[in-house]
Amino acid sequence: MPVINRIADLQPEMQGWRRDFHQNPELRFEEHRTAARVAELLASWGLEVHTGIAKTGVVGVLRAGSGGRTIGLRADMDALPMQEETGLPYASRTPGKMHACGHDGHTTMLLGAAKYLAETRNFDGTVHFIFQPGEEGGAGARVMMEEGLFTRFPCDAVYGLHNDPTLPLGEADIRDGVMMAASDRFYITIRGQGGHASRPHACLDPIVVGAQVVTALQTIVARRVDPLESAVISVTQFHAGTAENVIPDEAKLVGTVRTLAPGVQDLVETAMRRVVETTAAAHDAVAEITYRRGYPPTVNHAEQARRAARAAETVLGNGRVRRDMPPVMGGEDFAFMLLDRPGAYIKLGQADGARGAKDVHTTGYDFNDDLLPIGASFFASLVEQELPRP
Ligand code: NI
């Protein structure tokens, strides 16, 4: 069975919702308009709607039959602080804000599944439709959990998805175990002694020290981490100085660390502290590092990954669900939900020739609307599979 027929009929309506979200992007924890629209639609189909969880999070509850089984389906709603340059007729109307990760599509696919399941109720139990704020750096999933998400709305298992521009439309990717990396941030300040650039011997140049810190940090991945393990250290900002003839007092470095295993994460953090402090000390400078742990690795539970793969195969066909692709070093805050509940996270391909193939987090990205009925059918099929009627 391909896409569910009734959901295929919903495609134009879903596309309307999606493009409306796309035109009106909202950043983390400011998704007021989006959340209001989600709540309005869910209520119009007869779902019980709860709003204001983690500020703008929404949960829709749908019950059918008398069974006690429960399932949670999660979508993210937030956009990114970027200037859209797609030139599309439905491009962002808000300068500097853009749906560049397809969360407009994720929200729409979950809405499509909710509409279909509310009409058909061909399941037995309770479905919790979880619309979360702040996936992009806000840990909105964790905030919803801190505000009692899984005690107020118990879920035997929880499932999430993401579009994937590197995978063809009609294919999916789901692994047992780790899917996405832990994502940490670091902030380094190197304090030297500024002065006239013609008299470097009378100064302590923080730029030269900073350059050596950047290089030394790369030796951690190259020489400290087991070659069979994975780690990324990227210095993404280097700020210092105000004039061409002044050595500044300090330099600031900012960046990100990605790892797949907790032991590697610990090793990298410890090694970075030592390398930063000792490299600076070798030049009589002082360096401080603030290391902030962000999202943990996104780790699928094997049993739920198998169940999600089966539902995806129902929609996409045999052999269209890849089970052997490597994890990626991006981070994802659905990881917090998978630490608390059994569940799985799946990626759905959206590349169709040139369409839908621009990478996420680029100014030319757009969600491929042909994926809408596929994602909605996946969620709906998963519910009918996991909460079957007696
Ligand atoms: Ni995303």
Image (cartoon, rainbow, N blue to C red):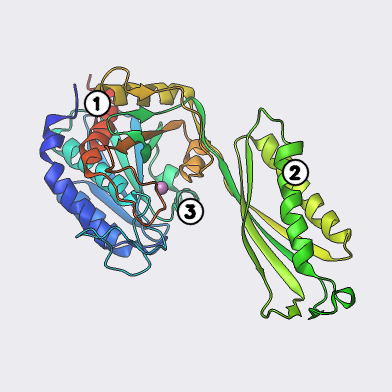
Q: Position of residue 225 (x, y in %)?
A: 72, 35
Between 352 and 105, the one nearer to me in the picture: 352
Q: Is residue 43 visible?
A: no
Left or right of 315? Residue 193 is right
Mark nearer the viewer, 1 or 2 = 2
**Residue at x 15%, y 42% (from the top left corner):** 11
Between 63 and 365, the one nearer to me in the picture: 365
Give the secondary structure at mark 2: helix
Instruction: Tell me, for residue 143, which label it has, or none.
Output: 3
The total number of labels drawn is 3
Give the secondary structure at mark 1: helix
Instruction: Tell me, for residue 315, which label it has, or none.
Output: 1
Mark nearer the viewer, 3 or 1 = 1
Amino acid type, label 1: Val
Amino acid type, label 2: Thr
Residue annotated with mark 2: 219
Q: Position of residue 87 (x, y in %)?
A: 25, 60
